Each structure stands twice: as structure tokens, then as C-alpha cells.
Image: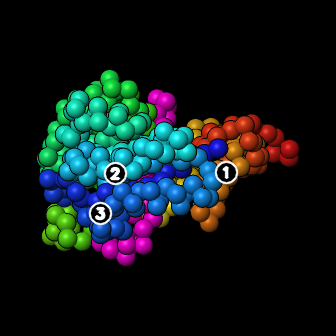
Amino acid sequence: MKKSNIAIFVPHLGCKNDCSFCNQRVITGRQAQPAPDDVRRSVETALAYGGVYEIAFFGGSFTAVDRHYMTALLEAAAPYVDGKTVTGIRISTRPDAVDEEVLSVLKFYHVTSVELGAQSMSDRVLRLNGRGHSAQAVRDAACRIRKAGFSLGLQMMTGLYGDTDAGAIYTAKKFIVLHPDTVRIYPTVVLPHTKLAALYENGQYVPQTLEEAVALCARLYAMFTQNGIRVIRMGLHAEQSMQQAKLAGAYHPAFGELVASRVLRDRILDYPPGHYRVYICPGSVSKLVGQKKENIRALEALGYHLQIVRDRALQDCDLRLEHVTENA
């Protein structure tokens, strides 16, 4: 059974930096900070529906918040891990807010996975976007997390101010060296009341188009999966506040689906044109077809004719092709 997150957003608290792109009120759709009772209420509501869950504290600076507040949230979550009603606790934080002492606290409260908002492995790009940490801080934190026995997650952004496609590929290569268990990829979105918005309005920043971001993220997805790293998120969550507030950038409520669709198209293009029987898991058929049959039309225009066969033995973006005669 697929595991789902019980997402608890802890916006902005603890972050001493003013990143160029950040407006967490819009990103999370939240203004208030969650209390321990909110954690318990969210968990109980999810468990009432059944399923397999992991509690996830998102917001990007969890270990930099007030320590008493952090432990109060963890104390509310930990009994559910003790009671085996959830599988674990996942947190996301800054690379410069991870040391041995805080990792020991996380371990005590049964945190199982730590994600780092690295965003880039270029010191220049990090500096231009006001991240307040270096690429070396990412490497150091990742090593500490691994050594302490946590699952390691890394998060990167594409289309940052001063970055390029080549820069994003460089970041992915540096991530791969760190052997994370999971990766999240977020294209940059221009939000109001941010430094990036001012740069955009002054013509100093040109955001990625949706097509550019999809093509790049398909390449990144292939790099990570070929190295045994799971990509567990592509694109920001589909929040109404995001749709209404964004000024520019590669935002789409189904961005991950668009990328998966491009990945599947690219894999078929590795074969010469012809007639093929394509085996794919049932849940990915719509991704192969593409929105409004975009993939099918594009492939047919290039000489690819497909018979789609659902195969429950395959997963996600896996597929298998058999060449068939034209009349088969």
C-alpha cells in the first residue's frame, strides 16, 4: 500500500534569511503556526480514513525554530510512531541548522527522515538568492544525517536567479555524489512581495517557461532514477493561493504529471520510429498518452505508432517496448 504524508506546515519560523523567492504564506496557504493540538488533530483525521501514513513537518526550517516549540510538536507526533499507527516522522530544514545535538533530539522523538532545502550546489547561485549557506554546508549536513542513521532527502530548485540549465545539471550531479534516498525538484515561481518579484518587474530576472522547466526536470528525473534515487515530488503543491498569487514562473497544478509524461515520451524516442506494443503500469497510462493526447500526437508525427498494454508488474515510469509488424 502506498504511503502518504500527513503534512504539517511550519511556515517561516526560525528562518533568519530572506531568500529571493520565498513567500511561505502563499506557498503553504497558511498564516498561523500549528500548535501541538493541530498535529494530533491532523493525524487523527487522516487515520480515520485508513491507509499508511508518515507525519511530515514541512516549511524548510524546522530545526531552526524555537527549541521548545520544535520539541512540543515532536512530542505530539512521537506517540503515533510508538504506537505504530504511523511509520515515522519526516522533517525538512536548512543545511546550516543541522548539527549532532539537534540530530540526537530528532532521533529521540523517532524522526526517520531529514530533508535539506539545498536548492543549489553553486555558491554563486546560493549567494545571489540570499540563501545564507554554502554548498559545503549541504555536504556537511548530509554527511551528519547519514552518519546518524536517518533517511536523507535533498531538495533543489530550477530556474533560480543567476542559474542555468547547466547549473541545475551540476547541482543534480553533486546531489548524486551525496547518495540521498529521495529528491524533490521545484521550479522557481515568482511570488509577490519577494526580492525575485522586484528583479522580475525590473527586467533583471527572466523566469523559466513551463516548457523549459518540464524539459529540464525530465532530464533531472532521469539522472536521479538512473542512480537509484527516488524523486518524490516535482513542482509545488497545488494550492489555490499559489494559483492566484503567482506573478510568473513554471507553475502548473499537475507539474509532476507533465514531467512524467515527458520522461515517458523521451524513453520511447530512444527507439527508432516504428510500430510498438508498449507495456506500462495502469496508473501511468494517462501520463504516456499525455494531456489532451499530446504525447500520442507528437509521437505519431515522428513515425511512432503505439499499442498500449497495461502491465501491473511495472511501476511508475517504467515501460517495456516490443516491436510489432504494422498489421499485428
Dot 1 falls on a residue whose secondary structure is helix
240 in relation to 140, above or below = below
Q: Is residue 12 found inside the magenta-colored segment of the image? A: no
| Viewer-proximal residue among 22 and 199 | 22
Magenta segment, which residues?
223-251
The disc labelled 1 sits on which kind of residue? Gly
In this view, 14 is above or below 280: below
Residue under numbered circle 3:
33
| Type of amino acid at the residue the image marks with label 2 | Leu
Identified at 41% across, 57% down, the residue is: 39
Q: Provide the residue designation for mark 2.
A: 73
- Position of residue 147 measured from the top left corner of the image (x, y, whole percent): 32, 23
Q: Residue reaching furthest top?
A: 147
Q: Position of residue 296 (x, y in %)?
A: 65, 56
Q: Residue furthest right?
A: 328
Q: Is residue 120 above or below residue 285?
A: above
> Residue 69 vs residue 289: left or right?
left
Residue type at the position of mark 3? Gln
- Residue 283 badge: 1
User: Residue 250 or 140: which is nearer the viewer?
Assistant: 140
Residue in view at x 62 percent, y 58 percent: 49
Front-lying residue, 223 or 70: 70
**Relative to the observer, which residue lies in front, 86 or 4?**
86
State the residue at coordinates (20%, 71%). Answer: 193
Q: Position of residue 188 (x, y in %)?
A: 31, 57
Q: Could you classify mark 2 by the number of other residues whose Cα lies within 10 Å: few (under 14), some (14-19), or many (20 or more)?
A: many
Q: Which residue is at 39% across, 60% downward?
A: 37
